[in-house]
Amino acid sequence: MTKLFSRFAAATAFAVGTLAFTAPAFADDAPTAPPPDVTITGAASVVSQYRFRGLAQSDNKPVVQATATLTHKSGFYVAFWGSSATANSTPIAIGGTEIDVWGGYSHSVAGVTLDGGLYGYIYPGFPAGNYYEIYGDVVKAYGPVTAKVGVNFAPAQKVFNLNFSSAQRSNTYVFGELSFSPAKTPITLHTHLGHTGGGFDYGKQYIDYTAGVSYKYKALTFDLSVVGTNISRSDTDRAFVSAPSCAGLGFSISTCSNYWHRPAKTVAVGSITASF
Protein backbone atom coordinates (compact mmCIF):
# COMPACT_ATOMS: atom_id res chain seq x y z
CA MET A 1 0.00 0.00 0.00
CA THR A 2 2.32 2.79 -1.19
CA LYS A 3 1.46 6.36 -0.31
CA LEU A 4 3.02 9.46 -1.84
CA PHE A 5 4.04 12.40 0.30
CA SER A 6 5.18 15.86 -0.84
CA ARG A 7 7.33 18.46 0.93
CA PHE A 8 6.65 22.11 0.30
CA ALA A 9 9.22 24.92 0.83
CA ALA A 10 8.29 28.56 1.62
CA ALA A 11 10.44 31.67 0.96
CA THR A 12 10.30 35.08 2.71
CA ALA A 13 10.59 38.19 0.54
CA PHE A 14 12.61 40.57 2.72
CA ALA A 15 12.29 43.57 0.43
CA VAL A 16 8.51 43.74 0.86
CA GLY A 17 8.17 42.14 4.24
CA THR A 18 6.67 45.21 5.86
CA LEU A 19 4.11 45.69 3.09
CA ALA A 20 2.95 42.14 3.51
CA PHE A 21 1.51 43.07 6.89
CA THR A 22 0.06 46.47 5.95
CA ALA A 23 -1.46 45.91 2.50
CA PRO A 24 -5.27 45.65 2.40
CA ALA A 25 -6.79 42.18 1.93
CA PHE A 26 -8.39 41.26 -1.39
CA ALA A 27 -10.65 38.34 -2.33
CA ASP A 28 -7.70 36.33 -3.67
CA ASP A 29 -5.92 36.75 -0.35
CA ALA A 30 -8.70 35.02 1.60
CA PRO A 31 -7.42 32.06 3.64
CA THR A 32 -7.83 28.68 1.98
CA ALA A 33 -10.20 26.17 3.50
CA PRO A 34 -8.52 23.70 5.88
CA PRO A 35 -8.16 20.13 4.62
CA PRO A 36 -11.10 17.86 5.47
CA ASP A 37 -10.92 15.64 8.53
CA VAL A 38 -11.65 12.57 6.41
CA THR A 39 -10.71 11.81 2.79
CA ILE A 40 -11.93 8.94 0.63
CA THR A 41 -9.96 7.58 -2.31
CA GLY A 42 -10.54 4.59 -4.52
CA ALA A 43 -9.86 2.80 -7.77
CA ALA A 44 -11.23 0.11 -10.08
CA SER A 45 -9.10 -2.14 -12.31
CA VAL A 46 -9.27 -4.68 -15.07
CA VAL A 47 -6.31 -7.07 -14.79
CA SER A 48 -5.16 -9.80 -17.17
CA GLN A 49 -4.76 -12.16 -14.20
CA TYR A 50 -4.61 -12.00 -10.40
CA ARG A 51 -1.23 -12.84 -8.87
CA PHE A 52 -0.68 -12.70 -5.10
CA ARG A 53 2.90 -12.94 -3.90
CA GLY A 54 3.81 -14.37 -7.26
CA LEU A 55 1.21 -17.16 -7.35
CA ALA A 56 -1.84 -17.30 -9.64
CA GLN A 57 -5.15 -16.80 -7.84
CA SER A 58 -7.38 -16.70 -10.95
CA ASP A 59 -6.11 -19.68 -12.97
CA ASN A 60 -4.21 -17.19 -15.18
CA LYS A 61 -7.52 -15.63 -16.29
CA PRO A 62 -8.63 -11.94 -16.28
CA VAL A 63 -10.23 -10.41 -13.19
CA VAL A 64 -11.86 -7.18 -12.07
CA GLN A 65 -10.75 -5.48 -8.86
CA ALA A 66 -11.76 -2.45 -6.79
CA THR A 67 -10.50 -0.67 -3.70
CA ALA A 68 -11.44 2.24 -1.43
CA THR A 69 -9.65 3.89 1.50
CA LEU A 70 -11.02 6.20 4.19
CA THR A 71 -8.27 8.21 5.88
CA HIS A 72 -8.55 10.49 8.92
CA LYS A 73 -6.24 13.49 9.21
CA SER A 74 -4.79 11.93 12.38
CA GLY A 75 -3.22 9.16 10.27
CA PHE A 76 -5.68 6.37 11.05
CA TYR A 77 -7.33 4.67 8.10
CA VAL A 78 -9.56 1.78 7.05
CA ALA A 79 -9.74 0.24 3.60
CA PHE A 80 -11.15 -2.58 1.52
CA TRP A 81 -10.10 -4.34 -1.67
CA GLY A 82 -12.01 -6.89 -3.71
CA SER A 83 -11.25 -9.16 -6.64
CA SER A 84 -12.85 -11.87 -8.69
CA ALA A 85 -10.80 -15.07 -8.55
CA THR A 86 -10.76 -18.80 -9.31
CA ALA A 87 -13.77 -20.86 -8.35
CA ASN A 88 -12.99 -24.05 -10.25
CA SER A 89 -10.61 -26.90 -9.47
CA THR A 90 -7.08 -25.52 -9.56
CA PRO A 91 -4.21 -25.81 -7.05
CA ILE A 92 -5.14 -22.35 -5.69
CA ALA A 93 -8.94 -22.16 -5.83
CA ILE A 94 -10.27 -19.48 -3.49
CA GLY A 95 -13.99 -19.66 -4.14
CA GLY A 96 -14.53 -17.09 -6.87
CA THR A 97 -14.16 -13.90 -4.80
CA GLU A 98 -11.67 -12.34 -2.41
CA ILE A 99 -12.47 -9.40 -0.12
CA ASP A 100 -9.68 -7.82 1.92
CA VAL A 101 -10.35 -5.45 4.82
CA TRP A 102 -7.62 -3.69 6.77
CA GLY A 103 -7.01 -0.79 9.09
CA GLY A 104 -4.00 0.89 10.57
CA TYR A 105 -2.06 4.03 11.30
CA SER A 106 0.43 5.91 9.13
CA HIS A 107 2.74 8.70 10.29
CA SER A 108 5.64 10.57 8.73
CA VAL A 109 8.72 11.53 10.75
CA ALA A 110 11.68 13.37 9.18
CA GLY A 111 10.70 12.24 5.70
CA VAL A 112 10.22 8.60 6.71
CA THR A 113 6.69 7.16 6.67
CA LEU A 114 5.85 4.45 9.19
CA ASP A 115 2.73 2.36 8.61
CA GLY A 116 1.21 -0.62 10.39
CA GLY A 117 -2.03 -2.38 11.18
CA LEU A 118 -4.18 -5.50 10.86
CA TYR A 119 -5.12 -7.08 7.51
CA GLY A 120 -7.92 -9.58 6.92
CA TYR A 121 -8.44 -11.85 3.89
CA ILE A 122 -12.02 -13.04 3.37
CA TYR A 123 -13.15 -15.65 0.82
CA PRO A 124 -16.98 -15.79 0.77
CA GLY A 125 -17.01 -18.91 -1.41
CA PHE A 126 -14.28 -20.64 0.61
CA PRO A 127 -14.53 -19.65 4.31
CA ALA A 128 -11.90 -22.19 5.38
CA GLY A 129 -9.32 -19.99 3.64
CA ASN A 130 -10.04 -16.86 5.69
CA TYR A 131 -7.08 -15.51 7.66
CA TYR A 132 -5.46 -12.36 9.01
CA GLU A 133 -2.01 -10.80 9.19
CA ILE A 134 -0.27 -8.13 11.23
CA TYR A 135 1.71 -5.79 8.98
CA GLY A 136 4.21 -2.96 9.14
CA ASP A 137 6.31 -1.08 6.62
CA VAL A 138 8.65 1.88 6.20
CA VAL A 139 8.72 4.22 3.17
CA LYS A 140 11.36 6.79 2.25
CA ALA A 141 11.61 8.98 -0.86
CA TYR A 142 14.94 10.04 -2.35
CA GLY A 143 14.01 12.55 -5.02
CA PRO A 144 12.27 10.59 -7.80
CA VAL A 145 13.10 7.23 -6.14
CA THR A 146 10.86 5.73 -3.43
CA ALA A 147 12.00 2.79 -1.31
CA LYS A 148 9.75 0.60 0.83
CA VAL A 149 10.43 -2.36 3.12
CA GLY A 150 7.87 -4.29 5.13
CA VAL A 151 6.78 -7.46 6.86
CA ASN A 152 3.44 -9.31 7.14
CA PHE A 153 3.05 -11.90 9.87
CA ALA A 154 0.19 -14.43 10.00
CA PRO A 155 -0.08 -16.05 13.46
CA ALA A 156 -1.31 -19.61 13.95
CA GLN A 157 -4.85 -20.06 12.62
CA LYS A 158 -7.00 -22.70 10.90
CA VAL A 159 -6.00 -21.75 7.34
CA PHE A 160 -2.66 -23.49 7.82
CA ASN A 161 -4.43 -26.84 8.02
CA LEU A 162 -4.98 -26.60 4.25
CA ASN A 163 -1.33 -26.68 3.20
CA PHE A 164 -0.10 -30.27 3.25
CA SER A 165 3.32 -29.23 1.90
CA SER A 166 4.16 -27.33 5.11
CA ALA A 167 3.66 -28.29 8.74
CA GLN A 168 4.34 -24.77 10.04
CA ARG A 169 1.53 -22.97 11.88
CA SER A 170 2.42 -19.37 11.05
CA ASN A 171 3.84 -17.44 8.11
CA THR A 172 6.19 -14.51 7.64
CA TYR A 173 6.34 -12.49 4.44
CA VAL A 174 9.11 -9.89 4.06
CA PHE A 175 9.48 -7.63 1.05
CA GLY A 176 11.24 -4.66 -0.46
CA GLU A 177 10.16 -2.31 -3.24
CA LEU A 178 11.79 0.39 -5.36
CA SER A 179 10.03 2.77 -7.72
CA PHE A 180 11.35 5.53 -9.97
CA SER A 181 9.15 8.37 -11.22
CA PRO A 182 11.09 10.86 -13.39
CA ALA A 183 10.02 14.46 -12.82
CA LYS A 184 7.40 15.87 -15.18
CA THR A 185 6.70 12.50 -16.82
CA PRO A 186 3.69 10.17 -16.49
CA ILE A 187 5.92 7.09 -16.28
CA THR A 188 6.84 5.07 -13.18
CA LEU A 189 9.23 2.11 -13.10
CA HIS A 190 8.58 -0.24 -10.18
CA THR A 191 10.06 -3.41 -8.69
CA HIS A 192 9.11 -5.76 -5.86
CA LEU A 193 10.96 -8.64 -4.20
CA GLY A 194 9.39 -10.77 -1.46
CA HIS A 195 10.03 -13.94 0.53
CA THR A 196 7.38 -16.32 1.87
CA GLY A 197 8.36 -18.61 4.72
CA GLY A 198 6.04 -20.79 6.80
CA GLY A 199 2.53 -22.10 6.44
CA PHE A 200 2.02 -20.44 3.04
CA ASP A 201 5.00 -22.15 1.38
CA TYR A 202 4.22 -23.52 -2.06
CA GLY A 203 6.25 -26.70 -1.98
CA LYS A 204 9.08 -24.74 -0.36
CA GLN A 205 9.90 -21.33 1.02
CA TYR A 206 10.05 -19.14 -2.03
CA ILE A 207 10.87 -15.74 -3.51
CA ASP A 208 8.47 -13.76 -5.66
CA TYR A 209 9.35 -10.80 -7.85
CA THR A 210 7.71 -8.11 -9.95
CA ALA A 211 9.23 -5.61 -12.38
CA GLY A 212 7.08 -3.29 -14.43
CA VAL A 213 6.29 0.09 -15.90
CA SER A 214 3.15 2.18 -15.52
CA TYR A 215 1.87 5.14 -17.51
CA LYS A 216 -0.62 7.62 -16.03
CA TYR A 217 -3.08 9.52 -18.22
CA LYS A 218 -5.50 11.72 -16.27
CA ALA A 219 -7.39 9.33 -13.96
CA LEU A 220 -6.19 6.21 -15.78
CA THR A 221 -3.06 4.17 -15.10
CA PHE A 222 -1.81 1.56 -17.56
CA ASP A 223 0.63 -1.03 -16.24
CA LEU A 224 2.61 -3.91 -17.70
CA SER A 225 4.64 -6.09 -15.35
CA VAL A 226 6.57 -9.35 -15.25
CA VAL A 227 5.54 -11.42 -12.21
CA GLY A 228 7.03 -14.71 -11.09
CA THR A 229 8.67 -16.88 -8.44
CA ASN A 230 11.80 -18.97 -8.00
CA ILE A 231 9.70 -22.14 -7.71
CA SER A 232 10.93 -24.58 -10.34
CA ARG A 233 9.06 -27.51 -11.84
CA SER A 234 11.31 -29.89 -9.91
CA ASP A 235 10.25 -28.11 -6.69
CA THR A 236 6.56 -28.64 -7.35
CA ASP A 237 7.11 -32.17 -8.65
CA ARG A 238 9.00 -33.06 -5.48
CA ALA A 239 6.32 -31.58 -3.20
CA PHE A 240 3.09 -32.46 -4.98
CA VAL A 241 3.48 -34.94 -7.83
CA SER A 242 3.38 -38.66 -7.22
CA ALA A 243 1.62 -41.57 -8.88
CA PRO A 244 -1.05 -41.92 -6.12
CA SER A 245 -1.87 -38.20 -5.99
CA CYS A 246 -2.04 -37.87 -9.76
CA ALA A 247 -4.24 -40.93 -10.00
CA GLY A 248 -6.56 -39.39 -7.41
CA LEU A 249 -6.95 -36.35 -9.64
CA GLY A 250 -7.42 -38.52 -12.71
CA PHE A 251 -4.24 -37.06 -14.26
CA SER A 252 -1.24 -38.57 -15.97
CA ILE A 253 2.10 -37.74 -14.36
CA SER A 254 2.88 -35.08 -16.99
CA THR A 255 -0.56 -33.46 -16.69
CA CYS A 256 -0.26 -33.53 -12.91
CA SER A 257 3.15 -31.87 -13.12
CA ASN A 258 1.74 -29.04 -15.26
CA TYR A 259 -1.26 -28.67 -12.96
CA TRP A 260 0.84 -27.99 -9.86
CA HIS A 261 3.54 -25.87 -11.48
CA ARG A 262 1.33 -23.58 -13.59
CA PRO A 263 0.43 -21.16 -10.73
CA ALA A 264 4.13 -20.46 -10.07
CA LYS A 265 5.25 -19.74 -13.64
CA THR A 266 6.62 -16.33 -14.61
CA VAL A 267 4.06 -14.35 -16.63
CA ALA A 268 3.31 -10.90 -18.01
CA VAL A 269 0.43 -9.11 -16.25
CA GLY A 270 -1.31 -6.09 -17.72
CA SER A 271 -3.84 -3.79 -16.05
CA ILE A 272 -5.90 -0.64 -16.55
CA THR A 273 -6.86 1.27 -13.39
CA ALA A 274 -9.25 4.19 -12.98
CA SER A 275 -8.69 6.23 -9.81
CA PHE A 276 -11.02 8.60 -8.00
Image: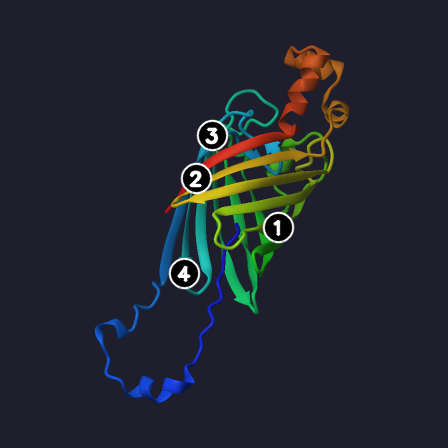
Secondary structure state at the residue bearing disc 3: strand
Point 74% across, 26% down: residue = 239
Label 1 CA crowd tier, 10 Å (few <14, some 14–19, many 20+): some
**x, y (%) of residue 225?**
57, 36
- Tell me whether circle 3 and circle 1 mark residues in contact (CB < 8 Å): no
**x, y (%) of residue 25?**
24, 80
For marks 2 and 4, the one nearer the N-term is 4
Of all residues, the one furthest to the front in this rendering is: 15
Q: Amino acid at mark 1?
A: Leu
**x, y (%) of residue 66?**
42, 39
Q: Is residue 234 above or below residue 158?
A: above
Q: Is residue 98 above or below residue 93?
A: below
Q: Is residue 126 left or right of residue 226?
A: left
For marks 1 and 4, the one nearer the N-term is 4
- Tell me whether circle 2 and circle 4 mark residues in contact (CB < 8 Å): no
Q: Nearer the viewer, residue 206 or 14?
A: 14
Q: Which residue is mark 3?
A: 63
Q: Nearer the viewer, residue 129 or 142?
A: 142
For marks 2 and 1, the one nearer the N-term is 1
Secondary structure state at the residue bearing disc 4: strand
